[in-house]
């Protein structure tokens, strides 16, 4: 993809952590950014300022992805006229607990945001990309969706569900030149992993370190910009060797 042509990347969940790193990386690769977030206006505006300082445009689109109605109100009219060249789904929450103690709210909120949210956004975006006959979709799953994690039955289920959804979607849209792939991070240094016991986790990782958001963003950027692309329907782990 040429950096000289104005292109748009829709980053769902882009105000912090991995989403922020992806938004900044794609902006440096020449994309204008549509950046969605739920409610942290301060963080979103900081990312917007960083993107604009890099010479690209950034439009902030606040809404709750778990709400079909809010998603439609935020994106429906916009997608009738413009199809983003790239769609990255990074929205996700965790509510960790052992299954025997897990509440209905802990289960439902995670599935609503992580999995239902993907459906709410992707349904509209894919329709626009099919009309345009092009596009690249990258979904951020997790190593927890590949190998499971104690205390994360809800989170692992949602992230495994994203992998299944992407594989099915890839079969639906590949002939229309729409590439669909998953990036599955391991333990990445973000707010979500601040409380993990590093002394217990690091021995499990062959590279003996946690990842950083740029490690993930670089892989996403490759999937969104590489001209010679034959990667489709794949799960790419960014986990330091935690899962092989």
Image (cartoon, rainbow, N blue to C red):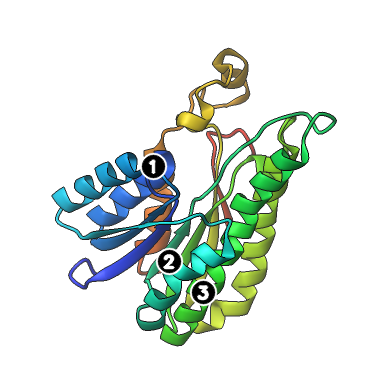
Q: Nearer the viewer, residue 42 or 125?
A: 42
Determine whether the residue tagged by mark 2 lies in a helix, strand or loop: helix
On the image, the x and y values in percent for residue 33 come to: 30, 60
Residue beneath disc 2: 74
Labels 1 & 3 near each other (Cβ < 8 A): no
Which quadrant of the view contains residue 77? Answer: bottom left
Residue beneath disc 3: 124
Q: Residue at x 42, y 42 (%)?
A: 18
Residue beneath disc 1: 40
Horizontal side of residue 56 vs 25, given as left or right: left
User: For the residue carrying disc 2, how many other residues have a C-alpha within 10 Å: few (<14), some (14-19), or many (20+)?
Assistant: some
User: For the residue carrying disc 1, how many other residues have a C-alpha within 10 Å: few (<14), some (14-19), or many (20+)?
Assistant: few
Determine whether the residue tagged by mark 1 lies in a helix, strand or loop: loop
The alpha-carbon separation of the residues under discs 1 and 3 comes to 24 Å
Horizontal side of residue 42 vs 212, given as left or right: left
Q: Which mark is nearer the camera, 1 or 3?
A: 1
On the image, the x and y values in percent for residue 132 come to: 41, 84
- Of the residues under marks 3 and 2, which one precedes in the sequence? 2
Q: Residue at x 66, y 40 (%)?
A: 144
Q: Nearer the viewer, residue 213 or 218?
A: 213
Q: Residue at x 25, y 42 (%)?
A: 46
């Amino acid at each position: 993809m040429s950096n000289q042509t104005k292109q748009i990347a829709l980053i769902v969940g882009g105000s912090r952590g991995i989403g922020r790193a992806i938004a900044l990386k794609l902006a440096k690769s020449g994309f204008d950014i549509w950046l969605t977030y739920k409610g942290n206006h301060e963080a979103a505006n900081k990312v917007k300022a960083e993107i604009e300082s890099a010479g690209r445009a950034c439009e902030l689109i606040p809404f709750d992805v778990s709400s079909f109605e809010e998603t439609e109100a935020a994106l429906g009219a916009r997608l009738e006229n413009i199809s983003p060249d790239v769609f990255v789904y990074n929205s996700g929450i965790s509510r960790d607990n052992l299954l025997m103690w897990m509440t209905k709210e802990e289960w439902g909120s995670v599935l609503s945001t992580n999995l239902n949210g993907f459906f709410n956004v992707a349904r509209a975006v894919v329709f626009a990309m099919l009309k345009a006959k092009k596009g690249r979709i990258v979904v951020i799953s997790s190593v927890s969706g590949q190998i499971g994690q104690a205390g994360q039955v809800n989170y692992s289920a949602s992230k495994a569900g994203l992998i299944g959804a992407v594989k099915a979607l890839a079969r639906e849209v590949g002939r229309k030149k729409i590439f669909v792939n998953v990036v599955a991070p391991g333990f990445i240094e973000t707010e979500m992993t601040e409380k993990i016991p590093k002394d217990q986790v690091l021995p499990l990782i062959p590279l003996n370190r946690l990842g950083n958001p740029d490690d993930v963003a670089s892989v996403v950027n490759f999937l969104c910009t590489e001209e010679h692309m034959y990667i489709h329907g794949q799960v790419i782990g960014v986990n330091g060797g935690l899962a092989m």
